[in-house]
């Protein structure tokens, strides 16, 4: 039978007898598949970035991700006076998001979840809470496991690595917000787990970066938006649902934001 382009299809496998009747039960249904035409180039770049990362080809992954950034990230924005200024930090283009097909947006979320490369000489791992593994997905065939913050041999390397972590968290936040926008609860849970795990070494610092406040707030709201049965079925998510508001209250209280800290008390 003919398939309509750009329409969502679900497949299942089953056996049929000579009369065309089902011989036994039908197999498990596939996830929705969309035959895209024309195939978006930025979707190809996003899949290449993710695949090459898992194959250990960091240089190719960065080059492919740069192509994705060119499509989806804003370089400039207008201020209140209508003057074009450079954007501060990563910011997605609402127009590019609105024009992209769902498959490209899913691939973009996965690409935004790619952790940055860390290559310090003689790195040492900061003792943190147990490493978290994230759920598998068709674009990521193996369970995701992210390394904790690496500390270099001197303060300069340590600071640069912490800045890299903060930059990564800002990109992961964009991925989480986009996952919530397209209504993919699995990607939302994936993003919350990744962001919280990435933040843990920074939260353990004597003076955690104030920038983490926004990330904690986003994770807090994302966890509340998940279906209760999804939370109860995943002990890891349940634990984060307890820890995130506590971390948020502690961080906001430490920087004198009593009103912000009270917002977590629900």
Image (tube, helix red, strand yellow):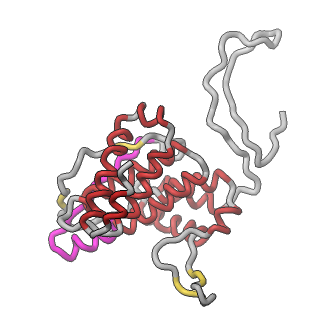
Image location (x, y in percent) of residue 65: 51, 65
The quadrant holding residue 133 is: top left
* Left or right side of 99 for 206: left
Q: Vertical placement of 7 versus 260: above or below?
A: above
In terms of depth relative to the viewer, which is nearer, 233 or 25? 233
User: Residue at position x 35%, y 35% from top?
Assistant: 235
The magenta segment is 142-165
Q: Is residue 148 magenta?
A: yes
* Left or right side of 123 for 18: right
* Left or right side of 57 for 183: right
Q: In this view of the protein, can residue 55 be seen by the observer? A: no
Image location (x, y in percent) of residue 217: 41, 58
Can you name the residue that lies furthest to the left here?
A: 153
User: Residue at position x 47%, y 35% from top?
Assistant: 228
Q: In this view of the protein, can residue 145 be seen by the observer? A: yes
Image location (x, y in percent) of residue 9: 72, 37
Tally of numbered discs = 0
* Left or right side of 37 for 115: left
In terms of depth relative to the viewer, which is nearer, 78 or 253? 253
Q: Vertical placement of 232 versus 40: above or below?
A: above
User: Residue at position x 17%, y 65% from top?
Assistant: 206
Q: Is residue 99 magenta?
A: no
> In which quadrant will I find the N terminus?
top right
Q: Vertical placement of 93 versus 137: above or below?
A: below
In terms of depth relative to the viewer, which is nearer, 54 or 77? 77
Image location (x, y in percent) of residue 77: 58, 81
User: Residue at position x 68%, y 62% from top?
Assistant: 98
């Amino acid at each position: 039978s003919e398939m309509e382009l750009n329409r969502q299809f679900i497949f299942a496998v089953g056996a049929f007898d000579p009369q065309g009747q089902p011989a036994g039960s039908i197999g498990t249904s596939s996830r929705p598949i969309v035959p895209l035409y024309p195939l978006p180039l930025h979707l190809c770049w996003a899949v290449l970035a993710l695949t090459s990362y898992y194959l250990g080809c960091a240089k190719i992954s960065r080059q492919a991700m740069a192509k994705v950034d060119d499509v989806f990230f804003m370089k400039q924005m207008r201020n209140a006076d209508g003057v074009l200024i450079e954007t501060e930090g990563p910011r997605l283009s609402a127009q590019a998001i609105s024009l992209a097909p769902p498959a490209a947006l899913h691939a973009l979320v996965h690409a935004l979840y790619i952790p940055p490369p860390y290559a310090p000489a003689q790195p040492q791992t900061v003792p943190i809470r147990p490493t978290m593994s994230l759920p598998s997905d068709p674009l990521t065939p193996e369970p995701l496991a992210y390394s904790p913050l690496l500390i270099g041999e001197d303060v300069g390397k340590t600071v640069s690595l912490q800045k890299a972590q903060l930059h990564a968290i800002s990109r992961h936040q964009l991925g989480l917000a986009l996952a919530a926008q397209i209504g993919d609860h699995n990607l939302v849970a994936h993003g919350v787990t990744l962001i919280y795990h990435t933040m843990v070494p920074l939260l353990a610092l004597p003076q955690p970066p104030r920038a983490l406040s926004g990330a904690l707030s986003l994770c807090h709201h994302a966890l509340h938006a998940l279906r209760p049965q999804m939370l109860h079925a995943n002990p890891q998510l349940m634990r984060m649902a307890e820890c995130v508001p506590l971390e948020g209250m502690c961080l906001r209280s430490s920087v004198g934001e009593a009103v912000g800290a009270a917002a977590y008390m629900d």
